Every structure is written in C-alpha cells, then in structure tokens.
Amino acid sequence: MKLSMHMIANRIYFLDMEVHLRESDPPVLKSARLVYATDCAYIYADENDTICSAESGSIRLKDVRLAEGFDIIQSVFDFYDDWYQNIQGLITQRAYQDLVDACFRVFHNPMTLFDTDCKVLGMSSQYGEDDGDREWAYLSRYGYSSIQALEYMRSFYPAHDFEYEKVLPFKFQGTILNCQGITGALIFQNEFFLRINVIEKDRALNQGDYQMLEMLLQMMHHYLDNERGEKNRNAENSVFYSLLNNEMTDSEKLNRKLMYAGWSAEDRYQVVIVRTRRKELSAKAAEVMRSTLMGIFPECRMIGREKEFILIWNISKSGAFKRERVRQIFLQTDADVGISLPMEGIFHLSYLYTQAKAAVDNKDLLGESSDKILDFYYMGINYILMSGSLEHMMYACHPDVRSLWKREQEEQDGLFDTFSAYLKYERSVLNTSQAVYIHRNTLLYRIKKIKELLKYDLEDAYTRNYMQVSVMVTELYRKMNHGLPERK
C-alpha cells in the first residue's frame, strides 16, 4: 500500500512532532529508507530529532533517536499493509460494521456507512449514543437517517447532492446536525451504491483523510467490479431499482425512501432513459454524463447502468419533465433520450421503464423528433399493435383514455362510453347521440365535460387515432371481465 506524508503523520499524530507538508502530497511512498530513494520516505537524524522527509515536505519527531525514529516510520508502512489486507477481507465478506470499526485506526474519528436507502450499515462502536450531535444519537437508536437531518442537509447545501457526489467536505451548525467532516459516495456502474461519512472529532481531518476515504471507496469499487453480476448488489441497492425491474420490494424501505424524497406512492411519475450510442463508455465519460444529469435534474432519482441512466421523474412534485434542460445538451452529445408516458403510482415504474426503453430501442419507428427526445407517446399505437401482452397494452393506452377509464370505475357516469362513441363516429354529434340514446343537448354537455378532463389536444389527428386504439384495448379488456389493471 502506497502512502502519503499526511497519511504517515495521521498514524502517529499523538507523538510530539512538527509537520511541514504541502496539500499536493500524493500517496506514492512505498517504504522507509535510511538513504534517499525514489518514492520512499527518507529518514535521517538532525541533532536529537529524527526527520522523515519526502518531496512534499517533512515530519520532525522531537527527541527521538534515528534508530527508534526509523522503526516508528517503518512500522507505519507495516501497519497500513496489514490494515489494507484486513479491509479487503472485510469488504469481500461485506462485514460493514467490522470494517467501520477497523477504519477507526486510520481516521481516529467517528465514521458511519450508509446504504442507498440511508440505512446504517456500520457505525463506529468506539463512540456512544451521547458522543455526537442529535443526529448521531438518532442513528445509534434507529439505524436510519432522520428526515429532519436530510431536509436540513439539502437546505444547507442546496448545490450538493450528498447521495451522489464523491468525496467532499461538510460543516453543519444546526440543532440536529452540528458537526463537520468529509463524505464520499461509491458510484458503481453509474449507480449510487453506498456513502461513508467521517466526522471530525478527536483529530483534525486533512489531505491524508481524503486520500484514505478515496482509497477505501476504490477498494469497494474494485471488489464490486470483480463480482460483476447485478444480483450480488441487491443488499445495498435502491428500492427504485427493484421497482424498475418489477421485483418484490421492502415496503418499509420504500416508504422511508419516499418520505426522504418528499414523494408519495400515489404521485404521478414518468421514466426517462439517457443512453449513449457508443459501443463502450469509459468510466470518466460515464462520470461526466452522470454529473451533468444530476446537475440539470437534481429533483429526480437516478439509477445508472452500463451504458444508460434511468431518471425517475415525479410529475406531482416537480411538474412536467423539463425537456428544455436536456434538449440543447444532448443535441451535441452522442446519446438518445427516451421518455415514457406519465402515470399515477410508484408501482407502475416497471411499465414506464419498459416504455422509455421501447422508445430508445425502436427510435426508427418514431422518425425525426423535433426536440431530439424519443417520446413513447408517438409510438404508443405501434407498441400496442406489436405487444403480445394485454396488460402491457393497457398500460400503453393513451393517458387521457386511461384516466377516463379509471374515472369510470369510480364514478360510473357513462362518460367513458360517451367518449368511445364520440371517437368511433368521428366526433359526429348526431351519430353519437343516436348511438348512445341521449338527447343532443345532453351529449353536448357531456362532451364539454369530457374535454375539460382531457390533457391532450383532440384536434390532433395522431392523438385521436391513439385514443381510438386505446379505447378498443380497454373495451377488449372489459369484455374479458377485467377491471383496470392496478398493481397494489
């Protein structure tokens, strides 16, 4: 394990010493030497003191003889080598609590490790419940971040997303959070995996601590990279990932995740996919794309895969998807942007993901989009015709038709049947009134009410065709004695 001078000083911080180091102190030192050697700590005597020197500066051990001083510095290298091997084993075992406790020996400060749902995976057992601020006590008792703390973090650092950004400092001076330190996120295959916080309490944090945290995250990333398969990530993965893949979800985790985001399971959602057209995407390019997306869409939740990013957009809380933010950026980028239909309910994410994916996979069916966004809406008819699943056909129906159909199940006022006939008879008032056996004035009243409920333009030819096909699908579904498919 290669060290920096800051990392050496942090290990022996309790000794009487003088430290003169530059911030530009990379971890390149391989061992201690009594003679100068490249990428080694040079140890020599200066009167009664021992000097540990490198290109980035020096550490003076006061009143320490050379032989003893050399043993001290070399023992630091030996310690870190043993520690590194131990940490590798703990990462492989996913023994996170033991890992956090082992890290106390290098940080000498409290540390917490969280999964993507803000659940504590490990917390320094060297410190008790009363050894920190109110949030530390809350974490000790309940094992999750408090909603109040997360809201305070967002308000205190509005430009930062602590769930996604890599190593950066923080300093809070509130009643719930009153601490400072550094935090680092592990991003694996463009997806947030876990987060580590180191709090400054017993020793001032410095460049060496940043390097140690970055090294720890790199070790975890390397292990995950060797593991490869997606199923090995389930323990720490987001419940959103499970929802997108139509997998069973932990209701407690989901409810907590929604509370953290300020979302509701009944909100209206949309899924957007940003997929690169490159055959391979370097880690650096993926990081740039991820940071760009999080910068322009901080209100969304994002999940990354090998060559694509999945954005979960809450329409109820953030309004319509901000197309103008992404349009100009991806005009000059070798990437496709697919967007699903809007739909109520968090449990419909798998259908929305399928739609956004279909828009990207079948972009040739969409033609040239005016704003370079591949909108599933404009391939809805083709998708219904090609789909082999009646359930998927129902979820691909025109949003206004789905809304009217759902409303009919609740109100049973005949508006859906009126609308169905109105489309079938090409909006002829006379033919529609005869078909549904109601007076012309009554029909006009119903049509006026229906148009007030519609969100799309009935004058658009494609919209009418899409609606008519969707009505046929819902009528087929009804004839097969089904209600509206709603996953609970």
Image: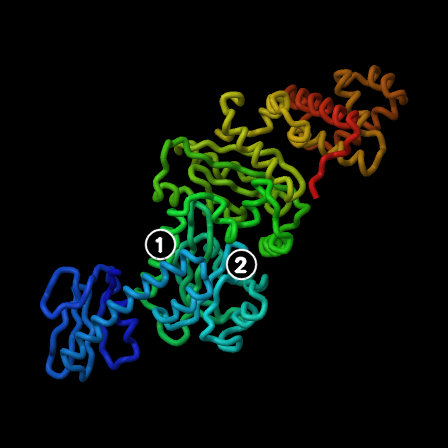
Q: Residues within 10 Å of mark 1 (few under 14, many from 20)?
A: some
Image vertical order of residue 126 relative to residue 366, above or below: below
Q: Which residue is at 40% across, 34% downward?
A: 333
Q: Amino acid at mark 2?
A: Cys
Q: Quadrant of the C terminus?
A: top right
Alpha carbons under labels 2 and 1: distance apart: 21 Å
Of the residues tagged 2 and 1, which is closer to the observer?
1
Query: Where is residue 52 drawn, in percent x and y?
Result: 17, 72
Q: Which residue is mark 2?
A: 118
Q: Residues within 10 Å of mark 2 (few under 14, many from 20)?
A: many
Q: Quadrant of residue 356?
A: top right
Q: Which residue is mark 1?
A: 218
Query: Where is residue 46 drawn, in percent x and y?
Result: 11, 79
Q: Amino acid at mark 1?
A: Gln
Q: Which residue is at 46% across, 65% downward?
A: 97
The circle on residue 39 is none
Image vertical order of residue 438 relative to residue 71, above or below: above
Query: Where is residue 471 drawn, in percent x and y?
Result: 73, 24
Q: Earlier in the sequence, mark 2 or mark 1?
A: 2
Q: Is residue 320 visible?
A: no
Q: Which residue is at 37% across, 31% downward?
A: 279
